């Protein structure tokens, strides 16, 4: 999608002509999609808790739904961040709270229990997807137990130590020449 990539580029910046395959794994792509789902769901719960409560037959629970929306937005932001595992596991925990909130709506006295049953089925399905995504990304991005990162092969100089010594020697020679001139 070069068109979208070029929208935010400044006038003198090079333009993207074509793109290649994504470097994201399937687990990372799923996590990103779940993050966007969280933002959309959270916005719905924040902006229309009354309509959602009426649809489920959960009258009087609008404030709780609004808080759940806030939690959902936070989980979405975390899921879209570098710490996606934290966001995904918070989605799983939030799904548990959502299921507990919808269960009372299955009462035979609720005229909207069909809607609540549909919502519960969707919640259980999404919970399974969230748990699988959380496990997959946690496994993909985890280091082995007790494993430490090794930086022994790194010097801190982008072009290597030899290039840094060459530049330093050239600068020292320029300094000596400047002293000789004066």
Image: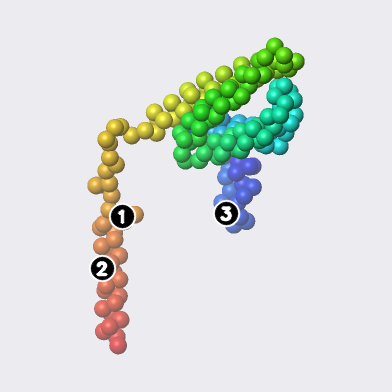
> Does the image show residue 94?
yes
Circle 3 residues within 10 Å: few <14, some 14–19, many ≥20 = few
Residue 29 in view (yes/no): no
| Lateral position of residue 18 relative to residue 82, left or right | right
Seen in the picture, residue 170 relative to 33 is either above or below; the reply is: below
Residue 44 occupies which quadrant of the picture?
Answer: top right
Q: Nearer the viewer, mark 1 or mark 3?
A: 1
| Image coordinates for residue 91, horizontal then vertical, percent | 53, 30
Q: Quadrant of the N terminus?
A: top right
Provide the residue designation for mark 2: 169
Mark closest to the chain's N terminus, 1 or 3: 3
Q: Nearer the viewer, residue 117 or 59?
A: 59
Q: Which residue is the site of mark 1?
A: 156
Q: Position of residue 3 (x, y in %)?
A: 64, 42
Q: With 169 as the anchor, is 65 left or right in this view? A: right
Q: Are marks 2 and 1 in contact (CB under 8 Å)?
A: no
Q: Earlier in the sequence, mark 2 or mark 1?
A: 1
Judge whether 77 appears above or below 14 on screen.
Answer: above
């Amino acid at each position: 999608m070069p068109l979208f990539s070029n929208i935010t580029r400044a006038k003198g910046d090079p333009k993207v002509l074509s793109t290649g395959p994504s470097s994201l794994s399937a687990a990372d792509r799923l996590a990103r999609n779940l993050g966007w789902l969280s933002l959309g769901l959270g916005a719905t719960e924040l902006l229309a808790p009354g309509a959602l409560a009426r649809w489920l037959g959960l009258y009087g629970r609008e404030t709780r739904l609004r808080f759940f929306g806030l939690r959902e937005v936070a989980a979405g932001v975390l899921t879209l961040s570098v710490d996606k595992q934290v966001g995904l596991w918070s989605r799983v925990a939030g799904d548990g709270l959502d299921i507990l909130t919808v269960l009372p709506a299955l009462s035979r006295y609720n005229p909207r229990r069909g809607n609540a049953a549909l919502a519960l089925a969707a919640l259980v399905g999404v919970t399974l997807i969230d748990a699988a995504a959380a496990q997959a990304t946690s496994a993909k991005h985890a280091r082995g137990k007790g494993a430490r990162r090794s930086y022994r092969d790194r010097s801190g100089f982008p072009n290597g130590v030899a290039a840094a010594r060459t530049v330093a020697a050239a600068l020292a020679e320029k300094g000596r020449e400047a002293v000789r001139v004066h």
